[in-house]
Amino acid sequence: MKLYVYDHCPFCVRARMPFGLKNIPFELAFMANDDEETPIRMIGKKMAPILEDKDGHMGESLDIVLKVDGLSGERLFGGTPRREISDWLKTWGGTVNALVIPRTPDPVFPEFRTASARAYFTEKKEATFGAFDGLLAETETHKAEILKGLGALSSFLPDAEASTIDDIMLFPTLRSLSIVPDLAVPEPVEAYRTRMAERCGVPLVSELRKAA
């Protein structure tokens, strides 16, 4: 069983999580961000994650989560996340993107080891989110905003020792925020994020930098 991903991608993090949380062995493959041929060959479009197994190829992160969830033990990731989690993600998604997207084409991620891959991502995302230089210039404003959101999140965090759909939805966003330097994440949120990264086997960006 092989999972093709981009390391920066929160949807790919979703798909990786049940393997770690349920101790299911798999092979992890990082695609270059400007490699269009590989995903198109497998699922007909440039998208990740992609699960390759005896049944063929599957895209869509939550479909992959559900399939992997059924491979071992009790099902853990069915249903829908708590309303507080869904609302939080919807409310703060724009602020997260403003902080994370312009920092994403970083060679700390395997998919951005080449200049062409970084340029490909930058061109695509600037067309949607605006010039990265402008977003980076607003860093302190966006940091102040997201700290309000993270403070509110502290009151309804999932249990880091449990495994539910809440984790599948929330942790990838918190992991994405780990690319933002000097972000004073509230202690309860940082503790949750760190523990979930350990349990999932999906390192935070700070850990990737240490290993680089």
Image (tube, helix red, strand yellow):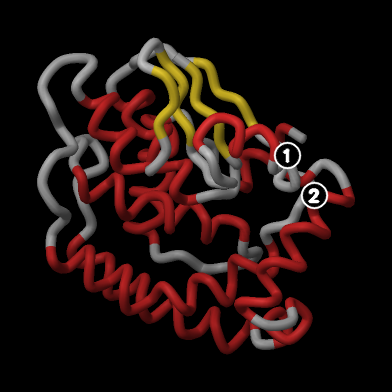
Contact between marks 1 and 2 (CB within 8 A): the answer is yes
Q: Which residue is labeled 2 in the image?
A: 117
Q: Mark 1 belongs to which amino acid?
A: Ala
User: Which badge, 1 or 2, is on the more N-terminal residue?
Assistant: 1
Find the distance from the CA under tag 1 to the CA under tag 2: 6 Å
Residue 86 shows in the view: yes
**Residue at position x 36%, y 16% in the image:** 55
Quadrant showing the N terminus: top left
Left or right: where does residue 81 sit relative to residue 188? left
Find residue 139 and report its image quarter.
bottom right
The residue sitting at the right extreme is: 115
For the point 69% across and 43% down, the residue is 36
Question: Between 147 and 3, which is closer to the camera in this rendering?
Answer: 3
Q: Position of residue 93 (x, y in %)?
A: 41, 73
Residue found at x 78% / y 81%:
133
Q: Which residue is mark 1?
A: 32
**Which residue: 31% across, 73% down?**
90
Q: Secondary structure at mark 1?
A: loop
**Three-letter code, disc 2:** Ala
